[in-house]
Amino acid sequence: MADDDYVYDEVTGEWRPAPEIAAEAAAGQVVRDSAGTVLADGDQVTVIKDLKVKGTSTVLKQGTLIKSIRLTDNPDEVDCRHDAIKGLVLRTEFLRKR
């Protein structure tokens, strides 16, 4: 690839330089929230939709703040803790970085 090649990134909806995309792919999986923002360990996220938690009668309401997330091997899931629920795993499609 030449340095002036650009590739359309469907996740972010932007045209990005091809070497930048190749570097991200070589570095490993990039975890993104519902808006396409890159997530990292320790970030704070907000729930964008009411979510029923399997195995409990608890519902995480829209706007609930989740502190100190941990990335997992699956780029579509993050491990986190909430006051009412320990060992919670949430899908990134329902989260937005704060």
Image (cartoon, grey):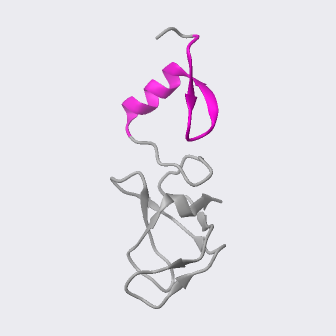
What residue sits 44% from the left and 26% below the top? 23
Magenta residues (range)? 4-28
28 and 59: which one is in front? 59
What residue sits 45% from the left and 43% below the top? 30
Asked whether the viewer can see residue 42, the reply is no
Specify the quadrant that holds the C terminus. Answer: bottom right
61 and 43: which one is in front? 61
What residue sits 42% from the left and 59% below the top? 77
Q: Percent position (x, y) of residue 85?
A: 45, 83
What residue sits 59% from the left and 63% below the top? 45
Name the side, left or right, on which 21 lies relative to 25: right
Name, please, the residue furthest toward the bottom.
Answer: 57
Q: Percent position (x, y) of residue 29?
A: 40, 42
Name, please, the residue furthest toward the top.
Answer: 2
Q: In this view, does 77 lie above or below 84?
A: above
Name, please, the residue furthest toward the left.
Answer: 73
Q: Is residue 18 above or below residue 74?
A: above
Q: Does the magenta stretch include residue 94?
A: no
Q: Percent position (x, y) of residue 73?
A: 33, 53
Q: Percent position (x, y) of residue 27?
A: 39, 33
Q: In this view, does 13 lie above or below 61?
A: above
